[in-house]
Amino acid sequence: MGLEELPGLAETTVLVSPNPAQDELRVNIQGKTLNYWEVYNIEGKRLGNYRTSKVSVADYLNGIYIVKIYDTEGNEYVEKMMIIK
């Protein structure tokens, strides 16, 4: 089975924007319903757990972060994002 044959893969698009971010970060899963998402620093420490699609990242330092996004069906999506002020 190739990647194009995996169920649900083609219709799901995850958007983390803006990237790089300065003050605010938005998460959107097209084709699915957002359950919650988490932000981790590069060392793997969880910095936040969010249930809204938009949050302030003004207190975060410049750097690279990992965003783990979960939809209501239990699927996990992982994106890299940067904060540059």
Image: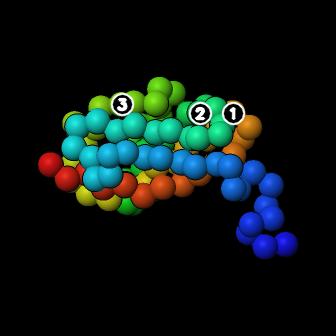
Residue 34, disc: 2
Q: Are marks 2 and 1 in contact (CB under 8 Å)?
A: yes
Residue extending farthest to the left is: 85
Q: Is residue 2 visible?
A: yes
The span from disc 3 to disc 1 (Cα, nearest Å) is: 19 Å
Kindly identify the amino acid type of the residue bearing the numbered disc 3.
Answer: Val
The span from disc 3 to disc 2 (Cα, nearest Å) is: 14 Å
Q: Position of residue 61 (x, y in %)?
A: 21, 48
Residue identifier under label 3: 55
Q: Quadrant of residue 26?
A: top left
Residue identifier under label 1: 72
Q: Position of residue 8 (x, y in %)?
A: 75, 51
> Tag 2 or tag 3, which sits nearer the N-term?
2
Disc 1 residue crowd, few under 14, some 14–19, many 20+, Cα 10 Å: few
Q: Residue at x 64, y 48 (%)?
A: 12
Image check: 52 left or right of 73?
Answer: left
Kindly identify the amino acid type of the residue bearing the numbered disc 1.
Answer: Thr
Disc 2 residue crowd, few under 14, some 14–19, many 20+, Cα 10 Å: many
Q: Position of residue 58 (x, y in %)?
A: 22, 36
Residue 84, disc: none
Residue extending farthest to the bottom is: 2
Q: Quadrant of residue 32?
A: top right
